[in-house]
């Protein structure tokens, strides 16, 4: 049995900066078989005018503590919000951190005029798909063999930000997509 500490439950969401990259990379490398590199994150942070980063930080933690619990990279591209990269520290998963990061990005996207949110998720990432479905995202397409290591399809999901379904609302259409 895995016990989770309450250290992950009390957190704040705020923008990430270059100084947070070491902590981002540690979470990234422990979360994905083909993690983004430092160069990829730096390119997003410094060279992509559409990119935005949010981090979930342990409340009240001050440097040199490692307070980063999770992060989200997303793009605001005209009327679209694109979720690019989301990860939470392994010992803090399933505690609402990813949910809160995505909701915050959607709120910020709305303030910039976005009307829909888009993402791609591994077909085999059941936990991720359940999170996105609970937030109201619905599958609308597939990219065959999009991911490698292992080779896997990407499920394309979208959500209208003009009438968002909330996590506690029920929904009828599961919107299953087969590749």
Image (cartoon, rainbow, N blue to C red):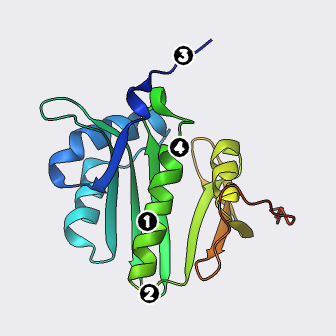
Q: Is residue 111 above or below residue 52?
A: below
The alpha-carbon separation of the residues under discs 2 and 1 comes to 12 Å
Q: Secondary structure at mark 2?
A: loop
Mark 2 or 1, nearer chain start: 1
Residue found 68% across the figure and 68% down from its top? 165
How many C-alpha atoms fall within 10 Å of the one at disc 1: few (<14), some, or many (≥20)? Answer: many
Q: Position of residue 74 (x, y in %)?
A: 41, 65
**Quarter where residue 61 is shown:** top left
**Quarter where residue 6 is shown:** top left
Which residue is labeled 3 in the image? Answer: 3
Mark 1 or 4, nearer chain start: 4
Mark 3 or 2, nearer chain start: 3
Q: Which mark is residue 113?
A: 2
Which residue is labeled 4 in the image? Answer: 96
The alpha-carbon separation of the residues under discs 1 and 4 comes to 14 Å
Q: Secondary structure at mark 4?
A: loop
The alpha-carbon separation of the residues under discs 3 and 2 comes to 41 Å
Residue that protrudes farthest toward the right in the picture? 172
Which residue is labeled 1 in the image? Answer: 105
Mark 3 or 1, nearer chain start: 3
The alpha-carbon separation of the residues under discs 3 and 4 comes to 16 Å
Nearer to us in this view, 77 or 104: 104
Q: Position of residue 17 (x, y in %)?
A: 19, 55
The alpha-carbon separation of the residues under discs 3 and 1 comes to 29 Å
Q: Position of residue 22 (x, y in %)?
A: 22, 39
The alpha-carbon separation of the residues under discs 2 and 4 comes to 26 Å
Q: Quadrant of the C terminus?
A: bottom right
Q: Secondary structure at mark 1?
A: helix
Mark 3 or 4, nearer chain start: 3
**Quarter where residue 30 is shown:** top left
């Amino acid at each position: 049995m895995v016990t989770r500490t309450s250290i992950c439950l009390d957190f704040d969401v705020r923008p990430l900066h270059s100084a947070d990259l070491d902590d981002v990379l540690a979470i990234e490398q422990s979360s994905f078989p083909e993690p983004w590199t430092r160069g990829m994150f730096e390119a997003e942070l410094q060279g992509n005018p559409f990119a935005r980063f949010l981090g979930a930080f342990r409340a009240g933690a001050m440097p040199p503590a490692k307070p980063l619990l999770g992060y989200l990279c997303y793009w605001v591209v005209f009327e679209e919000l694109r979720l690019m990269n989301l990860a939470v520290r392994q010992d803090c998963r399933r505690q609402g951190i990813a949910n809160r990061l995505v909701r915050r990005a959607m709120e910020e996207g709305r303030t910039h005029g976005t009307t829909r949110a888009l993402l791609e998720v591994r077909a085999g990432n059941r936990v991720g798909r359940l999170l996105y479905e609970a937030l109201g995202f619905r599958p609308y397409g597939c990219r065959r063999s999009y991911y490698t290591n292992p080779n896997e399809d990407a499920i394309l999901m979208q959500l209208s930000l003009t009438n968002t379904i909330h996590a506690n609302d029920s929904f009828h259409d599961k919107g299953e997509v087969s590749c």
